[in-house]
Amino acid sequence: MEKLPADLLALISYLKKLPGVGIRTAERFAFEFLGWPKEDLEAFSELLKNAPEKVPSCPICGCLTDRTKCSFCESGARDTEQLCIISSPRDVFAIEATRCYRGLYHVIEHLLSPLDGRHASMLRLDRIEDRIEKHPIREVIIAFDSTLEGDTTALFLKKHLIARPELKVSRLAFGLPVGSSLEYIDGGTLTRALAGRQIF
């Protein structure tokens, strides 16, 4: 490995930052890029460079959008009495694919993980409170991955939200595989988890 050119090693180190990409996969990707035509590499690098500006987060709910607001906030057909709290914009697409939820969404920026420096202050609870104040929210659905971080964050939010007696706080049914991410759950299982959500 030490004999590889420095720039190639740098490329491999960046590719390793991608989830699920180990050293061997990163090496394979890096060598693959070296074989791409120059115009493809330039188009790809331009796309990467501009992605945060081209696909920003909605300032209201945190979902991805290419406009001032996302389609979920702009739609008048959403159920404004339900708020589904998720930990990543990608989870929206998994939930929407079930076609059994028509409420609002709210993306928190991080799941709690003190060892990784992600503390309660980073949850921006004020933004959640603002959503609840501006809409007639009756139910908050916590839809986090079934992991230690997801469970810890869900419990923290529950303790914060139960101070509001008008709110029903529920969580996806625990039929989800332990340690699983929502984006990898099949539609049928996720649909049942939404339909069978439990008071939390």
Image (spheres, helix red, strand yellow):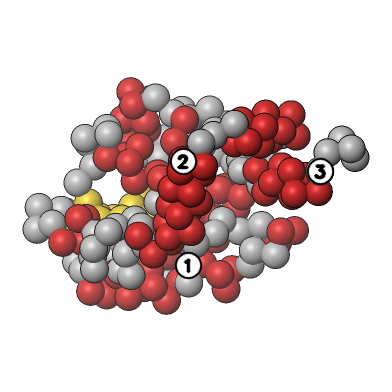
Q: Which residue has dot 2 on it?
A: 40
The outermost residue toward the front is: 38
Name the residue: 44% across, 36% down: 183
Name the residue: 77% across, 44% down: 9
**Quarter of the figure with residue 179:** top right
Q: Which mark is residue 160?
A: 1
Q: Position of residue 197 (x, y in %)?
A: 36, 39
Q: Position of residue 94 (x, y in %)?
A: 35, 37
Instruction: Please say if the residues under marks 3 and 2 sit with CB atoms less than 8 Å apart.
Output: no
The one nearer the camera, 158 or 60, is: 60
- In the rendered image of this protein, does residue 65 appear above or below residue 1? below
Q: Position of residue 191 (x, y in %)?
A: 31, 30
Name the residue: 48% across, 67% down: 160
- In the rendered image of this protein, does residue 146 appear above or below residue 128? above
Looking at the image, tell me whether mark 1 or mark 3 is earlier in sequence order: 3
Whether residue 64 is visible here, answered yes or no, is yes
Helix, strand or loop status at disc 1: helix
Separation of residues labelled 1 and 3 (CA atoms):
52 Å
**Quarter of the figure with residue 114:** bottom right
